[in-house]
Amino acid sequence: MNSTRIPGSLLFISLLGLASPIVNAEETRPPEGGGVPIYQQILDSLRESDSVLPMVPEVHPVVTLSNGEAVVPPQCYTRTEIRHNPCYVCHQDPIDGRENVMADADLQEAYSFSDMGMTNHWKNLFEDRTARAAAISDEEILRYIGEDNYSELSSRLREKDFKGWIPDLQNLHLGKDAFDVQGFAKDGSDWVAFNYKPFPSTFWPTNGSTDDVMIRLHLRFRTDREGKKSAEIYKANLAILEANIKGVKEIGSLPVDENLVGKDLDGNGSLEVVTRITRTGSWVGAAEAEPLDTSLYPQGTEFLHTVRYVGIGKDGSIVSSTRMKEVRYSKKAKSFSKAMYARRYDLEAMEKEAGNLPAYHELGQLGIDNGNGWALQGFIEDKKGRLRAYTYEENFSCMGCHNTIGSTIDKTFSFPRKLDGTKGWGYLDLKGMPDAPNKGETLGEIVTYLARAGGGSEFRNNDEMSARWLKEDGTTDPGKLAEAKDVYDLITPSRERALALNKAYRTIVEDQDFIYGKDAVLTPPKNVYDKIDNETSPTLPIDKIYKWNILLDWPDQAATK
Ligand code: HEC
Ligand code: HEC
């Protein structure tokens, strides 16, 4: 087997946990001399293997990458045609008081790809899957997406003595039925499901995937000062966290008995059951003295995100499938102050300036550390549809969106976008969810995105969305949009489209080449570049550059209780 090595001293740099300059573009090339490149060897083995753990070559993981810029997602290669902007939801300048000081709004208006980044490596986008998808019958795909590939995962990982996070939420494949009405996992694992508005385009079911997100705070935030677990303290701390992530002083909460918490949470002078918390400046229970600041999660916070096929419910409605495409997990392994984050962003910017490709601290089976406190790992379907751990490159691709873009809050997307207060606790439910505007705007987020991006997906390749919501000339149709009752109406596909996209994605699973892109597309989108030239590719004019706040302005608390 061929192997390319990088000097040992460079390994030490990466152990600092910073996004370190450990390679340049030259070194990620496949070995010379006609050998099979390492990424190809991995791919070949994935097409044969039945193991829950992928092959890990005995080389530094960085040299296993086929795409050293896998942190740059496909969205960045959209042809904007000097007017369509799907970029603003990620690339944003800092908002006062946040920990995120990334300041990358300029990427909306000027290309600054690295040499390697100028080529679109997501070549799966350019594969026509029509014929292969047509060969899969409706019955076959419905049966496939209806199967449970989640329940066996934990025991398979344990058998292999897997060191990373092992899924510990029972019956998650059932979706809603794994949780009580307040969102608490029925299995007592303390995972809590919340109801959030899916991120524009990427996580709209009409573009091929459904999903759900759960949060779990560290045990300290779930116990009282005597060390006993307490549901009341957990509920109060979850609400306190929500208020701080959203940067508000008070917030609605699940009913919390102040007598059991031992604190007047709503400051009204008496202890009773409350559903609104105004004392959001410190934690309660065992974690009372722990640091607390706006837009930061406390150390030990975990997120669980499952990405699924677009399922069809018994009544024909669009639901999440039983089968999971991916089980994604993140954990805040180390918390930093805002000042420390600011310094880290500076370092990152300096490295980019110096022309270094991004690199991260590899934690083996624990995933990859983004250098900013979070470790991410996960599982994806093997060729037969059983879940297996990510390869390094599959995992590496998580490090852009969850690290170095300006729009996120402490590297997360969904929790800041949770419906405020009580209504936002419980399993994801798009029905009845209003198209709330982003903070600082008046029109709904989805309606606004359709207009700015010029379509119902970043690539403007969603004909069904265009037919539903746009006029012939490509502008939004207010008359049609006024008929949409809720987020469900706006962003779920027809049954036909759902099945077609499920089939398209199934062919990527067969190929196992997720490193070339996971977008469920049947035919190559016309509006995507395969190459961009920083100097000559047309860019957006200033009146098409937008400020955007990931937070939503949900209707009055009273109305959403
Ligand atoms: C879903 C989020 C998302 C969207 C939408 C998006 N980008 Fe990006 N973009 C990223 C991420 C993540 C990176 C990698 C950041 C890094 O280098 O760590 C990136 C990188 C880039 C880079 C390279 C920057 C560098 O320093 O190497 C450019 C240029 C860019 N994007 C332009 C665009 C443009 C233009 C659009 C719209 C047509 C767009 N992006 C849409 C997430 C996004
Ligand atoms: C193109 C950008 C992008 C990439 C790449 C990406 N994510 Fe995310 N991630 C998101 C968005 C957007 C959400 C919110 C989901 C929603 O709104 O439905 C999210 C949500 C999550 C969450 C829940 C917590 C949160 O931040 O909201 C976890 C955990 C997660 N992703 C893990 C991963 C892992 C692991 C990978 C790598 C396989 C990954 N993500 C790659 C954009 C991205």
Image (cartoon, helix red, strand yellow):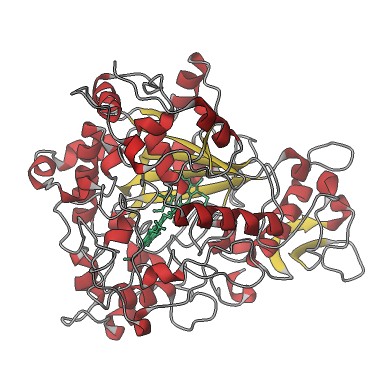
* Quadrant in the picture for residue 325: top left
**For the point 67% across and 56% down, which residue is it?**
296
* Quadrant in the picture for residue 481: bottom left
* Depth order, front residue of 475/536: 536
**For the point 19% across and 72% down, which residue is it?**
467
Quadrant (top left, top right, bottom left, bottom right) of the N terminus? top left
Left or right, 69 with respect to 263, comes to left
* Quadrant in the picture for residue 138: top left
Query: In terms of image quarters, where does ligand 1 lie?
Result: bottom left
* Depth order, front residue of 96/437: 96
Query: Residue 242 at x, y = what percent?
Result: 66, 60
Q: Is residue 365 above or below residue 220?
A: above
Query: Residue 385 at x, y = what percent?
Result: 30, 30
Using the rendered image of the protein, determine whether residue 85 is visible from the camera's viewpoint.
yes
Left or right, 399 with respect to 54, comes to right
Left or right, 175 with respect to 87, comes to right
**For the point 48% across and 45% down, which residue is it?**
305
Q: Is residue 192 above or below residue 204?
A: above
Query: Residue 298 at x, y = what percent?
Result: 70, 49
Quadrant (top left, top right, bottom left, bottom right) of the C terminus? bottom right
